[in-house]
Amino acid sequence: MRRWIAIVVGAVFLAVAVPLAGAHWLGWGGDAAFVPGADREVEIGGGRRLNVRDVGTGPPIVLVHGLPSNIGDWGEVPEKLAALGHRVVVYDRIGYGHSSRDDDASAETYTYESNARDLEALLDALGIERATLAGWSYGGAVVQEFTASRPERVEAVALLGSVGPASAPGDDALSILLGSPLALPVLRWVAAVPPVGNAFLGENLRLAFARERDIPPGFAERTRAMLALPGTLEAFVAEARRDAPSSLEPERIAVASLVLHGTEDFLVPLEVGRDLDRRLPASQLLVVPGGSHMLPTTHADLVAGALHALATERAQEAATSSSAGTSGKASRLEP
């Protein structure tokens, strides 16, 4: 009996250890050739830095990505906004891309609040007093947290496929895994076994994009390479465990707001967006028929046009309404 137990334990050990060793010694895992180069390094204090892309001139718009994501997932949106006459700042949040990693042992890291502090430090470092903020998915929670506590720094807010108080725990395989104590070791093992990792990532990308044909060429390879960067999986798991959508208070956000949501968003259902629109005092809702969770990637022109309108027309309308002493929600746009 002891012999068979030893054989079973040895087999389990080899099944786990060999792929991990292969990832280290044989170069399995993400292909470094797909990792894009760093942009501009911006110090935000405490020896921490953010990888930042700063393009264009004009009224500033800051783009805040979700998890696990990075600058590249915004695709052509920054350049399209710059062409429309805006200064566009997009950055890798702490834990992702080419930005610093935090100590996962601290409960003060990888939270909405810590990300909001990083955002404020970035605005200070770039000399931006007030900006339009666009938050995508988890980034929408960061923008809500920041705007509720620092309204004087925000011109207008856009929430794209954003989490909100109505968000419920996901019932897909990845969401269930992230809630497990084994999340990090399992994800490391999956990443170290190419066939398993490719299948796992492919299934989650199909869920994010709603349709496999909408996944851009090279997107899966770049995503896998970015996830393989040191510390990224740790940040991903920490943020997933520490997020608390029910703590968000969109009712406190008085600036002009846009909720942009796809009808086929399988990661953050449309009802979450509708609920955000109901709670935000000065919002408009733009529903994208057939749109998935990946609107900046699949609908770059629409996203850029909507953010441009918000940063110019909507912010001015909100200021005019305020000075005239009027109130009320903006009309909803549901094409």
Image: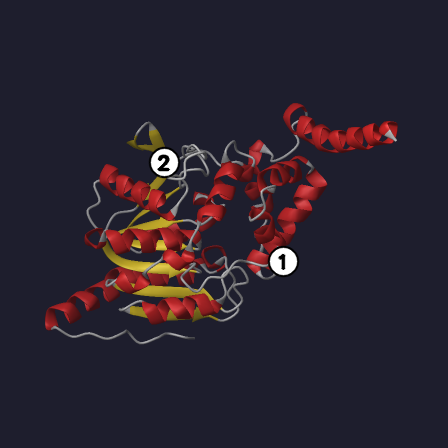
Number of marks in the rendered image: 2
Q: In which quarter of the image is residue 279?
A: bottom left
* Residue identifier under label 2: 50
Residue 257 falls left or right of residue 7: left
Where in the figure is residue 76, as x and y percent of width and height? 43, 51
Q: Distance between the residues labelled 1 and 2?
A: 32 Å
Q: Which residue is drawn at 44% across and 37% down?
A: 95
Provide the secondary structure element on which disc 2 rests: strand
Q: Is residue 225 visible?
A: yes
Tag 1 secondary structure: helix
Q: Which one is in front in this view, the residue at disc 1 or the one at disc 2?
A: 2
Q: Earlier along the polypeptide chain: callout 1 or callout 2? A: 2
Which is more toward the observer, 200 or 4? 4
Residue 197 place in picture, x, y as percent: 66, 42
User: What amino acid type should be assigned to the residue bearing mark 2?
Assistant: Leu
Residue 175 at x, y percent in the picture: 57, 53
Mark 1 lies on residue: 212
